[in-house]
Amino acid sequence: MNAGLLCGARCAVCCCMLVLTGCAHFEQFFGRYSEKNAQIAPQVLIASVPKSFQLSGRVSIAWEAQRWIGVIDWDYANAIETLSLSLAGQDFARFERYEGRARARLVNGQTFEENSWSELSARAIGVGLPFDLAPYWVRGLPAPGADVSERGTDVFTQREWIVSTLERDERGHPKRMRWQRKSVSLTLVIDAWNER
């Protein structure tokens, strides 16, 4: 009888050891499974969308042998955007973005449509301007999602454009800026700024 009890006790100990070993392997398996899944879990990218604003001011655009000086009125919102350029005291071009498409209408009646404002301005007025990134730049900030190659006090370089804040207002917001890329230079003086 003692031998039977001893045998039963040994069996119970062996069963416990097998269960504990199995639990350890089970835990290791699921630990590895969780780590593996964590590595391949989809990354959720949160896009930062700039706040809506209305801006008016003066603009000077120079490229190659040309130079334009005029007035800019810009109404930016996430869903729809309009930007008007007036040169020499007359309306010259009106840019619109709606449902992912960019459109331009010139004073002579010509219309253009492209996927981005940079492509659109290149077709409409002959020079590609970075208005796609500009809702961030007018705040003196680089746009998220695009590499910044150099950064200093009041200046950074993004997509080969050097963005400089030359003057700030009493609240610290940019008042005069210059955007330069190769032979293109845009100087913006912000006279009125309303954030919604």
Image (cartoon, helix red, strand yellow):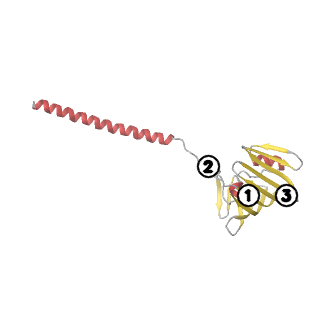
Q: CA distance from mark 1 to mark 3?
A: 22 Å
Q: CA distance from mark 1 to mark 2?
A: 22 Å
What residue lies at 13% left-to-right and 29% top-to-bottom? 4
31 to the left or right of 177: left
| Dot in front, 1 or 2 | 1
Query: Percent x, y for residue 135?
Result: 70, 55
What residue lies at 72% left-to-right and 53% top-to-bottom? 76
What residue lies at 86% left-to-right and 55% top-to-bottom? 91
Q: Is residue 52 above or below residue 154?
A: above
Residue 47's mark? 2
> Label 3 is placed on what type of residue?
Trp
> Label 2 is placed on what type of residue?
Ala
Q: Residue furthest left?
A: 1
Query: Percent x, y for residue 122?
Result: 80, 48
Instruction: Tell me where residue 74 sits by quadrant.
Output: bottom right
In terms of sequence position, does the residue under pointer 1 or pointer 2 come before the other?
2
- Residue corresponding to mark 1: 54
Instruction: Tell me where residue 24 sits by quadrant.
Output: top left
Residue 181's mark? none
SS type, badge 1? strand
- Residue corresponding to mark 3: 68
Q: Quadrant of the C terminus?
A: bottom right
